[in-house]
Amino acid sequence: MLGDWGIGQAAHTAELVLSELVTNAMRVRVPRDRLVGVRIAWLREDGLLRLEVSDAGEGKPEVRAPGEDETGGRGLMLVEALADRWGFEQRTCGIGKTVWAELEVPDRIPERDGVEIAAAAVRPGQCVRVWGAWRTVRSVGTEPPVSSEGCTVVLELDEGRRCGSTPPRR
């Protein structure tokens, strides 16, 4: 969708930032039936691409300064370096929080009918890679939006049964 919007090179940055936010959301300690929501919006009037990831976890996301030997802990450092603005807010319609990042997109975006898209295109039974392991999608649903527009796609993952070490062929 970012290509269709004419985002250009910023699409690569957006993909990396979104990947880091989703990875963090998947690592948050929450009940077994955790849900992660993803929203991508083009804020035309501000020239911004807004990426949002919601999870049921508590706490405040903080940029860490990991040691040289640590293999993780650099995600929010990347988000802070690549995004023009980022932050988080407590979810008004449920538990948890939404972490967001905004990227200024200098290119002119062509007018389109839609300005929002969910970043998930999965179905129950499909395998998705989370935390370096393949998991089976148990269910796919939607959640009402915080604002009056769009919706949030919600994936429920099977924690017990894992897919094989390689993804299934599409």
Image (tube, rainbow, N blue to C red):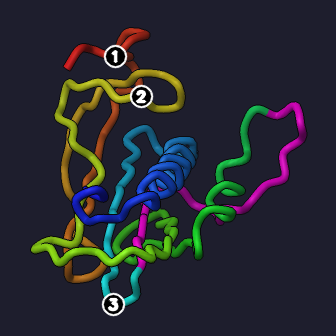
> Is 136 covered by the magenta stretch?
no
Label 1 Cα crowd, 10 Å radius (few <14 / some 14-19 / many 20+):
some
Three-letter code, disc 2: Arg
Place of residue 59 in the rendered image (x, y in percent of width and height, measured from the top left): 63, 62
Q: Nearer the viewer, residue 147 or 45?
A: 45
> Is 60 covered by the magenta stretch?
yes
Q: Earlier in the sequence, mark 3 or mark 2?
A: 3
Q: What's the distance in space between the residues labelled 1 and 2, CA to CA? A: 8 Å
Place of residue 76 in the rendered image (x, y in percent of width and height, measured from the top left): 66, 56
Image quadrant in which the N terminus is located: bottom left
Q: Quadrant of residue 54?
A: bottom left
The residue that label 1 is drawn on is: 167
Place of residue 41 in the rendered image (x, y in percent of width and height, measured from the top left): 32, 70
The residue that label 3 is drawn on is: 45
Q: Quadrant of residue 169?
A: top left
Label 3 Cα crowd, 10 Å radius (few <14 / some 14-19 / many 20+):
few
Q: Earlier in the sequence, mark 1 or mark 2?
A: 2
Q: Quadrant of residue 121?
A: top left
Residue occupying the point 38% across, 60% down: 8
Three-letter code, disc 3: Glu
Q: Callout 3: helix, strand or loop?
A: helix
Q: Main secondary structure of the magenta part?
A: loop
